[in-house]
Amino acid sequence: MTMPAVQDDPRIPVSVLTGFLGSGKTTLLRRLLTEPGMDRTAVLINEFGEIGLDHLLVKSVLDGAVVLQNGCICCTLKTDLLEGIAGILESRYAGTFPDFDRIVVETTGLADPAPIAQTLLIDPMLRNQVRLANIVTTVDGMLGADQLGTHEESLRQAAVADRLVITKTDMIQSDRAETLAAALSRLNPTARIFDVNSAHFDANALLTAGVTDPATKLAEVRHWLANTEPDDAHGQSHHSHGDHVHLGGNHSADIQSFSLRVEEEIDWTAFGIWLTVLLHRHGTKILRVKGLLRVPDAAGPIVLHGVQHVIHPPVHLDEWPDDDHASRIVFIVQGIDPALLRRSLMAYLRASTA
Amino acid sequence: MCGACGVLNNAPDWVDRVGNPDGIGHSENLTRGAERQRRVGLVNLLLRPTRMKLFDLGNTLSLQGPTGRVEIVEGLAHVWAAADRLSPNLVDPLDIEQLEIIEST
């Protein structure tokens, strides 16, 4: 397998591998690292507990692994992750660490991946040297539906993912895997869903091919839009509500995804200021935002995507992914009324032109 | 505080159009000063319901709270954090009362 190079971005892609306890993160990572073309991968593992078993598993495959020692990545990641990535970058430059083309950060099963994204995107040193690639979330094919319904950490991990990997599908009936995939798709319609045991399993598409990769960004946006078309007269659709996905439990009840459609051109500065204050006030409840915007004075459509408080640098597309040139913005939120959010955006955009 | 440029951030932000290599680009007519002034006006649309106001002082920006207290701010994110300190009435784009004021603009 050949990993396509990013044509105009020399920064090293960092993929975040997350997933609930026992959902198969390390097994997946171990498999990925044996794939052709994946040998130039540095791995950062968050060790949880006294025995670094995960570390040993990966170490046996790849020498270039560093274990974050300070327990749960949720609360220690900022310094640990910064030091971990800075350390391997410096060691690589010094020639004391094998050269690598990408980094994978494996979190604990209880981690919220959003602070990791925030660290990668905001730290002034890191953001010049690395870029956030995909957030990959493993979901246990046997237990995933129950875990999503009863453990908020699991649900949030799935909601923020760019890639959802259903594991252990060889141990369940195919219709059960399909039901879980359908539920995940409603929860997070922009994520691509993989069956780890599929003959078509594509490690490249899992880790690095995404909206920040020039070679794949158009296809990625097409996938977002294919699953999130607005379907009512108000330019708004509700594609998932937790209590419709039959995941069980209570945590899923207030997470939902919806897309907003705006026919008029969107003033970039006005939209940015509105989104900035929205994320300042409600960022922890806005799990993901992904959008394709028609902006005046911009050469082509603009792709916007973010995780909670953090927005990635915008991505230009040379062409529209389809004949529909309206702006479309997908939100995955927890406890926010989609109608109110749309009303707020439209009121502010109108006021900004008054 | 970046007193050199006075733009609503002393490092490029994803919103920035002028002088941002990672930004979305801009027309030739858009200058840094014009972008800064427009941003101040747009921020004030959101601040108005809470009786706060952002001022562009040329190379600095100041945020005035509802009691007249002033804070110097250095970036867009800092505006909202400063507003939280200056007013117990938090700026919230999803607050119905604030939204109605914006809708009446």
Image (tube, helix red, strand yellow):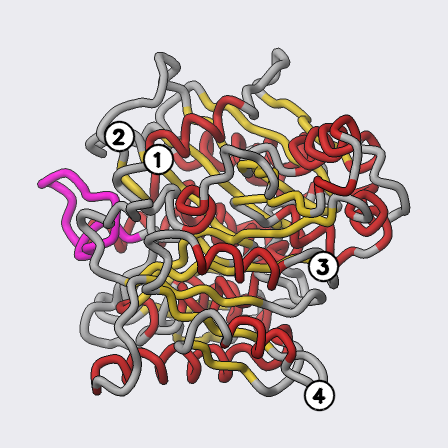
**Could you tell me residue B63's position as x and y percent?**
44, 67
Residue pointed to by mark 3: A20
Q: Which residue is drawn at 21% across and 87% down?
A: A94
Q: In this view, does A178 lie above or below A19?
A: above
Q: Position of residue A172 (x, y in %)?
A: 79, 38
Q: What element carries label 3?
A: loop
Q: Pointer 1 and pointer 2: residues touching (CB < 8 Å)?
A: yes
Label 2 or label 4, whichever lies nearer to me, is: 4
* Amino acid type at mark 2: Pro
Residue B11, image quadrant: bottom left
Same-chain status of marks 3 and 1: yes
Q: In this view, does A35 lie to the left or right of B47?
A: left
Q: Is residue A347 above or below residue A203?
A: above
- Label 1: which residue? A267
Residue count near mark 3 (Cα–Cα under 10 Å), binned few <14, some 14–19, many ≥20: many
Q: Which mark is residue A50?
A: 4
Crowd tier of the residue under label 4, counting other residues whose Cα lies within 10 Å: few below 14, some 14–19, many 20 or above: few
| Residues marked 2 and 4 touching at CB (< 8 Å) | no
Q: Is residue B28 magenta?
A: yes
Residue A257, how many percent across, how many down?
65, 35
> Marks 3 and 1: which is nearer the front?
3
User: Based on the displayed image, in which of its 4 quarters is residue A68 positioned?
Assistant: bottom right
Residue drawn at x 40%, y 46% is A204
Residue B47 appears in the rendering: no
- Mark 1 residue type: Asp
Task: Find the magenta span and give its range.
Answer: B16-32
**Label 3 close to label 4 by CB (< 8 Å):** no
For the residues labelled 3 and 4, the Cα–Cα distance comes to 19 Å
Q: Which of marks 1 and 2 is nearer the N terminus?
A: 1
